[in-house]
Image (tube, rainbow, N blue to C red):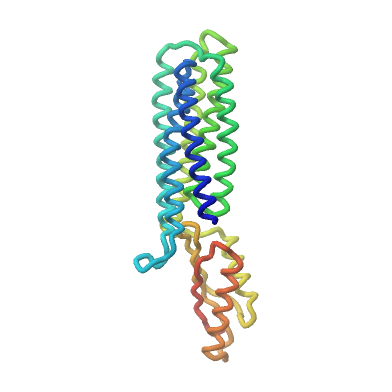
Amino acid sequence: MRKVRLMVLGIVVICVNIFLMLVKIAAGIFGNSYALIADGIESGCDIFTSMISWIGFHLSLKPADHGHPYGHGKIESIAGIFSGLSLLGAAGVIAYNSVLEIQSPHGSPEWFTLPVLILVVIIKWTLSLKVRTIGRKYESNALKGDGWHHLSDALTSLAAAIGISVAMIMGNGYEAADDWAALLACLIIITNGGLILNSSFHDLIDGTVPDEFYESVRSVAAAIPGVENTEKCRIRKSGIDLFVEMHVRVKASLSVGEGHDIGHRVKRALISASPNIKDVVVHIEPA
């Protein structure tokens, strides 16, 4: 049921991007606004990026098999890297064309481009909140990246709306205000792309999880009856799943069977404590 809901949301996201791309490009052409055309181009990139992000996320949920005993979670990190790179690529295209437009004299944008941009900002901001909330819920870099794509689109549209307003109010000499706005918005897009890339590479090479999560894992294990204390604890992230390996100290006088039973209780407690913990390996050590 969860997969079906997420799949439906992914389809809705892609359809919204197609609609906005057509509206923005048409309004930009007829309204003499390259900032709006650039916005439409970015929405076109978002369509492809959203498809890769959502497909990658769904593939990462495939269960473990003989060839992939740890599951397919790394696909999600790869999709996140693609999402970050596409953000940087989109920023580069928009920046290049904005500079060309600034250097080429042109008329001020038409008035109707402004309400189009305001509508785009509202839709994209709402879409971004929804996708980023799901991305945080499942700790998915691919979906977080897709959410940032929508937020970047909203910010680009907002910058363009401000630029068009300046051009309309100030008149002659300010025709390129929306192009400067599109150029400045690229800085935001580049920053977001870099953050997504950094996070995705971090997970791909088994980087550490936050210290707070380590402490919560140790606390849950230490609360199990029979556990004297905990030693080493290693946690790696694969997609939205977490794999835990920890050393637990028990009384040296306990039998192998008793120590084994404590280890299983620790494992069950940790998996119950966090829905993202996929598996736990417990090493029993004498206290």
Is residue 38 left or right of 263 when viewed as pictured?
left
**Quadrant holding the C terminus:** bottom right
45 over 10 or under it: above or below: above
Q: In which quarter of the image is residue 73?
A: bottom left
Location of residue 24 in the rendering, given as x and y in whole percent from the top left corner = 49, 25
* Front residue (pair 108, 216): 108
Residue at 56%, 83% (x, y): give it.
Answer: 261
286 over 23 or under it: above or below: below
Residue at 58%, 36% (x, y): give it.
Answer: 125
Location of residue 40 in the rendering, given as x and y in whole percent from the top left corner = 46, 28
Outermost residue, top direction? 172
Outermost residue, left direction? 67
Residue at 52%, 82% (x, y): give it.
Answer: 285
Residue at 43%, 41% (x, y): give it.
Answer: 49
Location of residue 242 in the rendering, given as x and y in whole percent from the top left corner = 50, 63
**Quadrant holding the N terminus:** bottom right
How many callouts does the rendering have?
A: 0
* Front residue (pair 78, 198): 78
Location of residue 225 in the rendering, given as x and y in whole percent from the top left corner = 64, 81
